Amino acid sequence: MIHNFCTCNSQMCKTCILQNIEDLKKHIKEYPDDVKSKQILQKLEKRYKNIYVIGKTNYIIDRQIGSGEDGIIYIVKDKDGKEYIIKKIFKETSERKILEAIEKCDNVNKILGYSKEYLAILLDYVNGITLETFLSIQEPLSELNFWHLINQLVDGLYCIHSLKYNHLDLHPNNIMIVKDDKTGMYDLVIIDFGRSQKIHTDKDRYKDIVCLFRVFAELYDKVNDRSDIIKEVHKLIDLCIKKQQIFFTKGKPLEDNGLDEINSIKKDITTHVSTKFIEFIDIFLTLCYGISDSKFKNSKSKRKSKRKSKRKSKRKSKRKSKQKSKQNLYI
């Protein structure tokens, strides 16, 4: 009943083992009293249920490290013991296609394979800690390391946006920090593209840019010796965050008087920070003021239209009442 060899190579692969399991199940249905076959089936199911086959490689589940609405994340190992990540998704999504589209971007978790049979995405294993954990460690960060991390985040995000995708879930748990023991420098990797979508307009980039600014502010608190430039950039970012909070939490439109202060700081720092970072700031300012202005105008126009419709309905009701009163007089 059980094959002693694999039909596709000299060793048993999971495809052939699964076939053996199916054959055994059929056999047991026909011969329910076959105790030996039942025992073999139980052993096979227990031994091989934790194996994923992607490409021609078997990956054995080592442990589960996370779960969410869209899937479960495992650390898996190949036959040599090398570690990878497998994300077992519950249903087909656009995440795999997005990961394939952005695989050439630096500082982004790389996709290595996909199994349609198991709905499993194979990813490179990032051996580090989350930014959230990194921020909780009571250890100062040098300004050199700070700018290295910020520039990596800016470069990664800029590349993703240039390929017309956004992240939409960029928080400290979706950013990994890896330390290079030789140089003492930290590297950054963006992970988890489960909520990513296509970018159609600059407005679709807004959420990612706000998250970038917040990461900047949180990392800034870890820097011990701060230069005048980093202080000026932080002042600018702080103003931007406050501006977007005013509008999005209180629903108030942004005022133009705050823009002059932001622009004056921006002129001072332009030559000291990357052009990509400046571009993100420009997009943010355009969108923040543009969004607030348009929403404010829309709300005004809605209120005006409501008032007009009310006045029209009142005039109609008055005309009807007058016509009725005239008819009653003639009667």
Image (cartoon, helix red, strand yellow):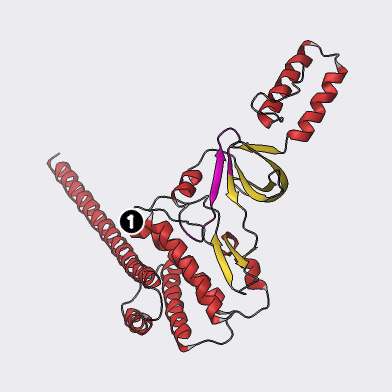
Residue 294 lies, with reference to residue 221, above or below; the image says: above
How far across and down, in percent of the image, does residue 240 sit? 42, 75
How far across and down, in percent of the image, does residue 259 sit? 33, 79
Residue 115 belongs to magenta span: yes
Asked if one can make out residue 253 in the rendered structure from this viewpoint, the answer is no
Q: Secondary structure at mark 1?
A: loop
Span shown in magenta? 105-121
Q: Please tell me which residue lies in front, 246 or 219.
A: 219
Q: What is the three-letter code of the residue carrying label 1?
A: Thr
Asked if one can make out residue 321 in the rendered structure from this viewpoint, the answer is yes
Query: On the image, numbered disc 1 is attached to which residue?
Result: 201
Residue at the (55%, 38%) spot, across then down:
91
- Quadrant housing residue 273: bottom left
Residue 199 lies, with reference to residue 28, above or below; the image says: below
- Quadrant housing residue 9: top right
Residue that extends furthest to the front in the rendered view of this protein: 10
Residue that extends furthest to the left in the rendered view of this protein: 330
Residue 37 located left or right of residue 125 = right
How far across and down, in percent of the image, does residue 235 sit? 45, 82
